[in-house]
Structures are given as structure tokens and as C-alpha cells.
Image (cartoon, rainbow, N blue to C red):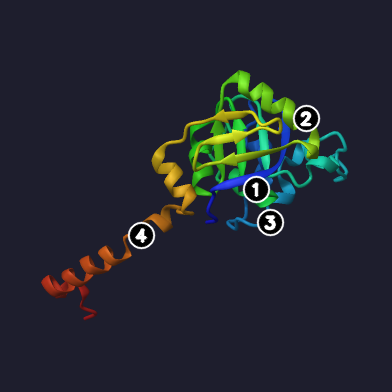
Amino acid sequence: MEKFKTLTGVAAPMNKINVDTDMVIPKQFLKTIKRSGLGKNLFYEMRYDEDGSENPDFILNKTAYRNATILIAGDNFGCGSSREHAPWAILDFGIRCIISTSFADIFYNNCFKNGILPITVSKEHLDKLMNDAEHGSNAKLSVDLQNQIVMRPDGGKITFNVDPFKRHCLMHGLDDIGLTMENKSKIENFENRKKILHPWLFSSA
């Protein structure tokens, strides 16, 4: 997956609590096992009217936020079912960082496995960032994962904490497969020793 070190971009404010994964990507779009193509259906029921046209009042349909790469969200974001399609849809839209006061555990962990940085901050700090985001494309945020800092448009800094292992994986673009492949030589050496010591295990007869 793509490495995450620093990110500067427009932040979209979604001042709504308990946004669950069905709101992020409704069940009718879970038939695919591909990670691409889901971005157009992100927040489908809020983003589109019944006739399929865009809801002009939804934040990501507003001109200033169509290319948002950061989402400022209300408390308990990503609750509900454990569908991994939720971070797939968020990433496919182009959002690589979500900032909230809290996340559902499974969604939080799925974000890291899909190249998205979820940041937990205090209510006071979230209010400041939400206010920044409401200024549109003229108020970009910068996220520095190396130093664990969010830089506000006025120059103010908000620090955050991330588990060191998760931070390492995200900065180096390592999902579960990538972590396994870091030990490729050890795995091959183990397999070669097994073939010598227990050749009957590898017999095709």
C-alpha cells in the first residue's frame, strides 16, 4: 500500500456523531472484492438524492471539498458492522486521514491496514479543527506522521499519538502481506531446511 509520511490538503468537516459503516458504504455495494471503484458510492445515502442526483447540501458535493484528503469527523466514527469496504471506499475517494475524538476499534485497525491514518484528538482540539475545515479550500491542514503533529492554517500545532507499530507500518506502506514479505528470506530458509530434513513432506508421489 502507499506510504504515509506527510499529508497537506483540504479537510472536510463532518460534524456528525456515530457515523456507522453502513452510512460510509451501504450494504448494496459490498458485492465486490475489489478495493477500487467504491469512492463514487461513499456516503451514498447522504450524498445522493433518491433520483441519483447529488445532494447539494452534502459536504463532499460542495466545490471546496470535492478533492478533500482529510476528514474531520464527529465522535465514534466507523461504528456498526466490521466491513472493510468502508476504508476501501474512503481511500478510493481520496481521503487518507480521518480526525475524530474516537473510532470504532475494528474500523480504526482497518484504516491502518489500508493506508489511512485515523487520528484521535480531544474534543477541544476537534472543535478547533472543525472550525478550520469550515473555511473550505483556503484552510488546508498538514499532517506529519513522523513527528505526530497536525499543523493548523494559523500555524498552531496539535500533537497526537499513534501506536509505534502501526505508525511504522503506515510510514513504510506495510499491510499484512507486506509485513510477511519483510521476512521472505527467513521463510525461504525455513522451507529449504524442511526440504532437507523432511523431504517426504515435499514429495509429489
User: Residue tagged by mark 2?
Assistant: 134
The local crowd at label 1, few if under 14, some if 14 to 19, many if 20 or more residues have their Cα within 10 Å, is many
Q: Which amino acid does label 1 sit on?
A: Ala
Is 77 displayed left or right of 148 in the figure?
Answer: right
> Which residue has dot 3 on it?
37
167 to the left or right of 140: left
Asked if the residue at tag 2 contacts the one at tag 1, i.e. Cβ–Cβ closer than 8 Å, the answer is no
Tag 3, which secondary structure? loop
Local crowd size for mark 2, using a 10 Å CA cut-off: few (<14), some (14–19), many (≥20): some
Q: Residue furthest left?
A: 197
Callout 4, which amino acid? Glu
Secondary structure under tag 1 reads: helix
Mark 1–mark 2 Cα distance, whole angstroms, equals 23 Å
Identify which residue, 94 or 84, lies in the foreground.
94
Q: Name the residue under label 1.
A: 89
What type is the residue that disc 2 sits on? Glu
Q: Is 161 on the left-hand or right-hand side of 70?
A: left
**Residue type at numbered disc 3:** Gly
Instruction: Tell whether label 4 touches label 2 (CB within 8 Å).
Output: no
Q: Tell me residue 176's x, y (percent).
A: 42, 53
**Residue in the picture at 65% in, 37% down:** 22
Crowd around label 4: few <14 · some 14–19 · many ≥20 (10 Å): few
Q: Which label sits in the foreground, 2 or 4? A: 2
The residue tagged 4 is 182
- Is residue 82 in view from this perspective? yes
Pick whichever, 112 or 87, lies toward us: 112
